[in-house]
Amino acid sequence: MLIVMKAEATKSDIDRVVEVIEKLGFRGHAMPGESRTAIGVTGNKGSIDPANFENLPGVAEAIRVTKPYKLISRDLRSEKSVINVGSASIGDGTMAMIAGPCAVENREQVFEAAEAVAASGAKFFRGGAFKPRTSPYAFQGMGEDGLKILSDVREEFGLNIITEAMDEAGIDLVAKYGDCIQIGARNMQNFALLKYAGRTNKPILLKRGLSATLDEFLLAAEYIMSEGNYQVILCERGIRTFADHARNTLDLSIVPAVQRLCHLPIIVDPSHGTGHNYMVESMARAGIAVGADGLIVEVHPRPEEALCDGAQAITPKQYVELFAQLERLHDALDPTSISIPASAQSAVSGFSAPLQDLSDV
């Protein structure tokens, strides 16, 4: 159920609704918006009588929600959520660039990459201290020592740290040293881990699973939010298909699909999405062109020596050039910067209706 408050509803009105929800044995999730507050109800096994709320002070209406996801839906929050990550934000209309090596290997390697990332103007740094690898004999990461190096990067360069956790202990460590906890593709449906992440106060970067559908992806985010953590960023990182020219198939169509249904920001990973560094530039441009809120890109000073995923990493020089190019593209696509000739406006003046979804017609 979704309870929509009146524009003039006070904090005490909202608190009163949440109190009634909890007395009924459910959980209330208040989501303030630009013009209203909506309160989602979770924990109910069946329908709830709207009469429980309709006469409460400040309530505009109570709506039954038929979708499997409630808290991530635009029904609950019509405007896009802006997620604060350390000293910066994702989803605020600027291009969020998250860059750095796949894995933290040593201090020199990380600082060399971080210097280029900071110099480009980016605000986020990525690097794995814990690495889930297909082979048990591959490099598994430096663990807490790697997190300490990432923390030093934040102190030295002012970059906000995003790094992966693989289990509950890892979440606690990343929360201690980092600014955002990444849940990787292999853990997208580790529901116990998602719930634990939902009980932290750190933003969560949730990567799409290797073969996850749109609904499965959104419901994974719902798991996190149902525990009270509404700071979720989605990430498309490629899925497995029959194609063999790339490591994965980067599904850019999911970006507008997510944005139509969901208020959470979504970024694109052209590095994991392709597995080849020569594809990263093109697919990064495509990610910005399709409307993603940002990118996460792998940067390594010496990709040929990388202990993890060197084939998909670009060099610091390539990265700086790419970032400048993407900023120009992002600015060019800003709707406020587009000028339509008067003759064109006149020609289409009779076609003012918005695009419609005809999938069910």
Image (cartoon, rainbow, N blue to C red):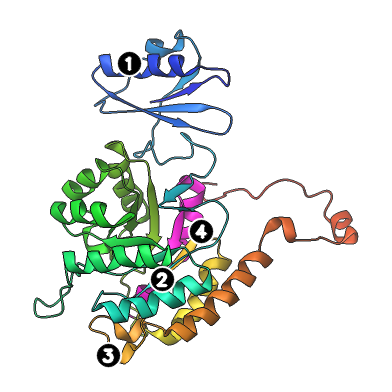
Residue located beneath label 4 in the image: 293
Give the crowd class for mark 4: few <14, some 14-19, many >=20 residues within 10 Å.
many
Mark 2 lies on residue: 99
Q: Earlier in the sequence, mark 2 or mark 4?
A: 2
For numbered disc 3, what is the local secondary structure? helix
For the residues carrying marks 1 and 3, which lies nearer the camera in this image? 3
Residue 288 included in the magenta stretch of the image: no
Q: Earlier in the sequence, mark 4 or mark 1?
A: 1
CA distance separating discs 2 and 4: 14 Å
For the residues marked 2 and 1, what is the alpha-carbon distance in whole angstroms? 43 Å
Q: Is residue 284 shown above or below 207?
A: below
Crowding around mark 1 (Cα neighbors within 10 Å: few <14, some 14 to 19, many 20+) is: some
Q: Is residue 258 above or below residue 279?
A: above
Q: Is label 4 in a helix, a strand or a loop? A: loop
Q: Residue flagged by tag 3: what amino acid is it?
A: Glu
Q: Earlier along the polypeptide chain: callout 3 or callout 2?
A: 2
